[in-house]
Amino acid sequence: MNRRDAVKLVIRTGGVVLGGSAVAGALGGCASSRRGGPGKIGEPIPNDPSVARAPASTQPWELSDPAPTSESAPSVASIRGVISRSKWARGRPRPWLADPMNGVRRITVHHDGMNPFTNSSWGGAAHRIEAIRNSHTRKGWADIGYHYVVDPAGRVWQARPLELQGAHVRSANPHNLGICVLGNFERQRPTSAAVRSLEDLIASEMHRLRIPLSEVRTHQEFAATACPGRSLQAKMNSTRSRGGRLRRA
C-alpha cells in the first residue's frame, strides 16, 4: 500500500476522532516511535490540531464470530462492541507518517505506564486515551502508538487503525498488533473486567488473524522495560500457562 492509498483508506474507515482532556502524570507511556525495521525512525512533524468533545455514551463489548480478512488490511469489523475512534479522539491519523501493517503476525501487551488509573467512566477513559494520543502525535508520530486500548471497566477502544504499523515496541513494530491496558501495573492491579476483556480480545485476534500463542508477548519480553507492570505481567504469564485462558483459545 502506498501513501496515497493509505490516506484514502483512513478516510474510508472513519479516521475523524473526538475529544477528551489531558491527564495528570507523565504522558506517552511505554510506546516507541521506531518505524519499519531496526534503524528506521520517523522524522519529527508538527502537531495536528484538536477539535470537538466526546459524547458520554456507553456501548457493550462482545465478540462475534471471526470474519475472513485480507492479510494486508485487517479490520475491527468482526469484533462487535469495540468503541470506534469517532467516539473518543480529536484528530485524524496521519498515515503518511506510518508504514503499512501488511499483515499481523504477533500481539504485544502494554500498560500505559502513567499515574495509576481506576476511573471506570466512559469520559474518564476517553480523556486518558486522548491524552496519550496527544503525547504521541506531539512527538511527530502518525497517531497513538497502540491499536487497541482496554479500560478498567473492560471496554475495548479502537486506537490506531490496524492497517497502519504501530509504534509501541522499538525495533519490533512490523506486523505487531499493540494492545494497551490503561493504568500503571507496577503500582496497581488490573481489574478483573479489564483482564477478561484483554483475554477475550487477544483470543479473538489470535483466531481471526491466525496468530499462535507463542507470538503473544508483553513489552518486557522484547526489551528492558517494566511494561506492562508486574501485576499485568503476572496475569499474562498465567493466561498463557497450562490451563490458562489463552492456552485453551
Image: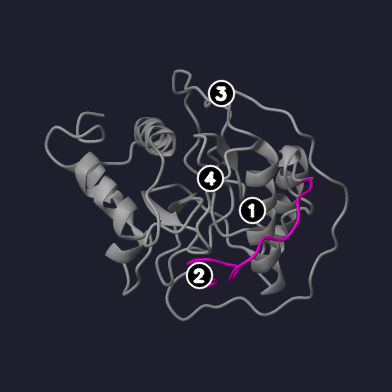
Q: Is residue 112 above or below residue 243?
A: below
Q: Earlier in the sequence, mark 2 or mark 1?
A: 2
Category of crowding for the residue at label 3, using alpha-carbon neighbours closer than 10 angstroms: few (below 14), some (14–19), many (at least 20): some
Query: Which residue is identified by label 4?
Result: 148
SS assignment at label 3: loop
Query: Which residue is label 2 attached to?
Result: 32
Residue 222 locus on image (x, y percent)? 31, 66
Provide the residue span drawn in magenta: 17-35
Q: Amino acid at mark 1?
A: Arg
Closer-to-camera residue (16/242): 242
Task: Name the residue beneath numbered marker 3.
Answer: 80
On whether residue 26 falls in the magenta region, the answer is yes
Sequence order check, earlier mark of 1 and 4: 1
Q: Position of residue 137 (x, y in %)?
A: 69, 67
The answer to which quarter of the image holds residue 193 is: top left
Q: Earlier in the sequence, mark 3 or mark 1?
A: 3
